[in-house]
Amino acid sequence: MASNAIDQTRRMLSLVTYLRERPGAHVTDVARAFGITEDELISDLDVLPLCGTSFRGGDLLDIDTDGDRIWWHNADDVAAPLRLAADEATALLVAARAVSTLPGLRESDRQALVRATAKLETAAGDNAGASARLSVTFESEGGVFADVDRAISERRRLWLRYYSPARDELTEREVDPIRLFAVGHTYMEGWCYLSEARRTFRLDRVAEIRILDEASSPPEVELRDLSEGLVQPAAEDPEVVIEVGPGGRWVAEYYPHDSADELPDGGLRITLRTPDPTSLRRLALRLGGDGHIVSPADLADSARAAAREALAAYDRQPDGSYDRQEQGR
């Protein structure tokens, strides 16, 4: 399975705790414990000395290895409790209280956040007072969330006008809602009668919503495990190959993929799967000169056509004509 920057960050956070509890741990044992090769572990160890609570020398992780064992020389110093300044404590408390009110947040996560906020208030002492006078409210999805939540509890069907960015159009749909959840944004999962399939709708893309009198009766479906994220490509999904230059390497960090092979110019050849390949046309336009779709051929042609249309739109004059200089090219 391909490793990306997010995987490496998660691993290194766990690695810090692991090494603190095991002074002089053997490289082979640590690599085996984390399910990685010794070369991958050494690569992580090369990055860790650049990390710490600040960029003052004594606050960085002093970790090295002789190729056999790993030593952390300043574990006690770096692991000392972090002291927050008044503005840092205020920012954290305001953000924590705001997030705890987000619709779609799992109750277990909400309770964990409330407990963490209470501990932070105690630790901040007098500095916590200012945060109590500040608040952040999320309102953009509130009305839609309330209607979906009510439709689920009353088992009623919904009518939506929904914006689909992949097709750049508004569609009208009737949906039997199944559940609400949050993964970055707040979503509704439901049975869509327009598509005659289970679909996921982002609440901030719902232009209009009505609760219908008709009873909701979605088919029995197995709920997906979303702990690994919203986008989880399946083996039967169409395969797409994208080549990116050095400026487009970020694609491998943000998109789940099957492989990411190095190219001679410092770029990557990325193979991924998606149930809706046409949604990647927007990615191709965003990449511009930093990348292009290789296959399937029809998707590559579609992306090139979309790019030509976008360029033509810039050449048009307000009256719909084209710049004569551009026409002569």
Image (spheres, grey):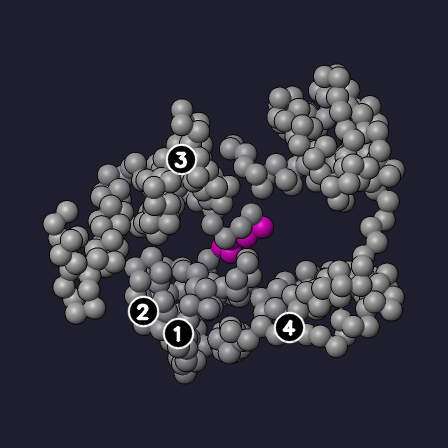
Mark 1–mark 2 contact, CB under 8 Å? yes
Mark 1–mark 4 contact, CB under 8 Å? no
Among numbered discs 1 and 3, the one appearing first in the sequence: 1
Q: Judge whether residue 225 is colored magenta.
A: yes
Q: Tag 4: Cα neighbours inside 10 Å, few (<14), some, or many (≥20)?
A: few
Among numbered discs 1 and 2, the one appearing first in the sequence: 2
Q: Nearer the viewer, mark 3 or mark 2?
A: 3
Q: At 40% across and 27% down in the image, what residue appears?
A: 265
SS assignment at label 2: strand
Q: Is residue 111 visible?
A: no
Q: At 35% across and 60% down in the image, what residue appears?
A: 165
Q: Nearer the viewer, mark 4 or mark 3?
A: 3
Amino acid type for the residue under numbered disc 4: Val
The stretch in magenta equals: 222-227
Which residue is under mark 4? 136
Q: Which label sits on residue 43?
A: none
Which residue is under mark 2? 170
Mark 4–mark 2 contact, CB under 8 Å? no
Q: How many angstroms separate mark 4 from mark 3 (CA)?
A: 40 Å
- Place of residue 116 in the rendered image (x, y in percent of width and height, measured from the top left): 77, 60
Q: Nearer the viewer, mark 1 or mark 3?
A: 3
Q: How many angstroms separate mark 3 from mark 2 (CA)?
A: 34 Å
